[in-house]
Amino acid sequence: MISKVKKIGVLTSGGDSPGMNAAIRSVVRACAYYKIECVGVYRGYEGMIEGDFKELNARSVNNIINKGGTILKAARSEEFRTKRGRQEAYENLKNKGIDAFVVIGGDGSFTGAEIFNKEFDFPVIGIPGTIDNDIFGTNFTLGYDTALNTAVEAIDKIRDTASSHNRLFFVEVMGRDVGHIALNVGVGAGAEEILIPEENLGLDRLLESLKKSRKSGKTSSIVVVAEGDKTGDNVFELAKYIEENMPKYEVRVSVLGHMQRGGAPSCFDRVLASRMGVKAVEALLDRKSNFMVGIHDNKITLTSLDLAIKGKSKINAELIKVSDIMTT
Ligand code: F6P
């Protein structure tokens, strides 16, 4: 049982994602509502190690719900992987009177939080913030919905030029280990093929499928490729292979990259962030620790950090089938 929490630290860690500011705002306002103090930790665990802290009150987070990025900055900290780094972080937190923290980030950030909790018996709660949606224990991570909309909008524009020139476009979207973004964006943008790490289509089948659709009368096509897909070494190699084997087709590559991580969060992400932030603070006030806040069937839930880290988020098999039918 942990003692009553009086001062909560909040940090954003790992890759940023739209909705992180809305989550910071929610944590800060929930602390103000429950009359406890809140301190912002800058640059994730890096700032914790360096003691880069700032007291936050309800007014410090005015006008940020609609902003992309994170006002607290984000970082991937190598030093926090070391015992010495974590010891320094612990001493800084204690000196500042912080007795619990909420970390908004992905599985790497949760792993750090879990180790820290075990070493120092320090109360921690995680909020899943990553565009990849690759965290077990939640249907949605913060920023995923916004990233989907950003990517679909970009591909719609690529489609305009693809069809004007009768071209085949390979569009790479983010998703280091999982294909959630690619699959959803591919279906939403009407892609001809969707390549994801969970399924290896293989170069020959890709070629066959593109030839078939060309024969059926399609003059332009979009192939959405997840960053982590294993069909070729990379999206440029795929494009080269297809161009060599379909010489009549003009092939182009577009890598959407980090633009998918920016921009104003969608309404869905803002609401989700607001709900998750409140739950994170309430969990700590209920003397709970080592949990991640998630959402299931529109209910806010808690999953142990351990499970959130070790579990695997599953690709939607029904959506794969839908995408196959749509490309008939
Ligand atoms: O984890 C989120 C993510 O955007 C991945 O999709 C991508 O592979 C990675 O971060 C990129 O990280 P960085 O910002 O370090 O280049």
Image (cartoon, grey):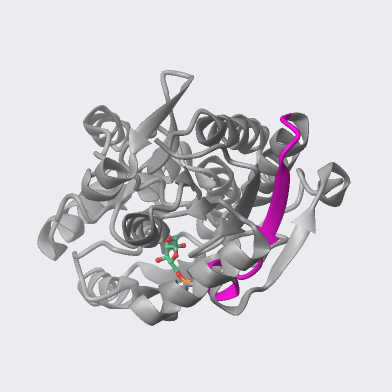
Answer with the quarter of the image where residue 294 lies: top left
Q: Is residue 41 magenta?
A: yes
Q: Which residues are magenta?
A: 34-47
How far across and how far down the image is residue 112, in percent? 38, 62
How far across and how far down the image is residue 62, in percent? 86, 46
Residue visible at 13% across and 60% down in the picture: 202
Residue visible at 47% across and 42% down in the picture: 141
Closer-to-camera residue (252/231): 231
Closer-to-camera residue (60/6): 6
| Left or right placement of residue 58 versus residue 208 in this view | right
- Ligand 1's image quarter is bottom left
| Left or right placement of residue 48 versus residue 31 in this view | left
Answer with the quarter of the image where residue 195 lies: bottom left
Query: In this rendering, is residue 224 above or below 308?
Result: below
Residue visible at 77% across and 37% down in the picture: 32
Residue 25 seen in this snapshot: yes
Closer-to-camera residue (262/237): 262
Residue visible at 52% across and 36% down in the picture: 284
How far across and how far down the image is residue 22, in percent? 69, 43
Q: Is residue 59 magenta?
A: no
| Left or right placement of residue 197 versus residue 5 in this view | left
Residue 264 seen in this snapshot: no
How far across and how far down the image is residue 63, in percent? 86, 46
Task: Tell me the quadrant of the picture where the N terminus can be found.
Answer: top left
Task: Tell me the quadrant of the picture where the C terminus can be found.
Answer: top left
